[in-house]
Amino acid sequence: MLHRNFFHTITVLAVVSLSAFTSAARAGGDHFKVYLNNKLIIEQSILGTFTIQQLQLDKANVNDKLTFHYSHCGEIGKSRKIAVRDARGKLVREWKFADARGRQSGMEIPVKELLELKQEGLQFVYSAQQLPKGMALAALVMADKRTGWLPSASGWIVKAMLSGWDHPPVGLI
């Protein structure tokens, strides 16, 4: 009887321990967050495939700051860099960050510096000692006064305002 209780206790402990490690493995992995002036705008986990989201900035954001946080399975990286690369992968601009102390992992970039990059097809790429080849985090879209989101053809008046009243879009009047 004593032998049976001992075996039962060991089995229960093994199952509990195994399930704890299994759920921790699923919950782990790399993830990142992007903040604009301390407001969370992008958060993604890197488990398998993920979608690169667009980050749109314009002149109204000139005094703002972007802050990136990247976690390698719960750990902050060493020798961290955020690069902006063009569509061909060519380095356009790079920021290097000191190794973080404690939980302060934020990598801050002034939006003003990004607005000076007058190119299209740019991406933010994070790299660190733990991720030397880098990981594309988000696409950078520079907006100006002529860009706008038009949800349907009924937005012709907005198109006319952006392109000039004297030439409204053809076929929408």
Image: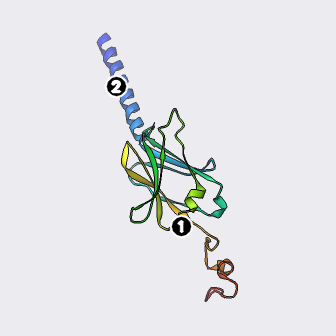
| 123, above or below 81, in the image | below
- Residue placed at 37% from the left, 46% from the top? 131
Percent coordinates x, y for residue 128 in the rendering: 41, 45
Q: How far apart, in angstroms, are the residues tagged by discs 2 and 1?
A: 58 Å
- Residue placed at 32% from the left, 10% from the top? 2
Name the residue type under label 2. Ala
**Quarter of the picture holding the C terminus:** bottom right
Do the residues under discs 2 and 1 have CB atoms within 8 angstroms? no
Name the image quarter holding residue 7.
top left
Q: Nearer the viewer, residue 142 or 31?
A: 142
Q: Nearer the viewer, residue 12 or 69?
A: 69
Percent coordinates x, y for residue 151 in the rendering: 61, 72
Percent coordinates x, y for residue 133 in the rendering: 35, 51
Kindly identify which residue carries mark 1. 118
- The local crowd at label 1, few if under 14, some if 14 to 19, many if 20 or more residues have their Cα within 10 Å, is few
Name the image quarter holding residue 5.
top left
Name the residue type under label 1. Lys
- Residue placed at 61% from the left, 51% from the top? 65
80 with respect to 132 (left or right): right
| 51, above or below 161, in the image | above
**Quarter of the picture holding the N terminus:** top left
- Residue placed at 39% from the left, 51% from the top? 134
Of the image marks 2 and 1, the number of the one nearer the N terminus: 2
Percent coordinates x, y for residue 23 in the rendering: 41, 36
Q: Secondary structure at mark 1?
A: loop
Residue 1 is at least partly visible in this image: no
Q: Which mark is residue 28?
A: none
Q: Nearer the viewer, residue 24 or 15?
A: 24
- The local crowd at label 2, few if under 14, some if 14 to 19, many if 20 or more residues have their Cα within 10 Å, is few
Kindly identify which residue carries mark 2. 14
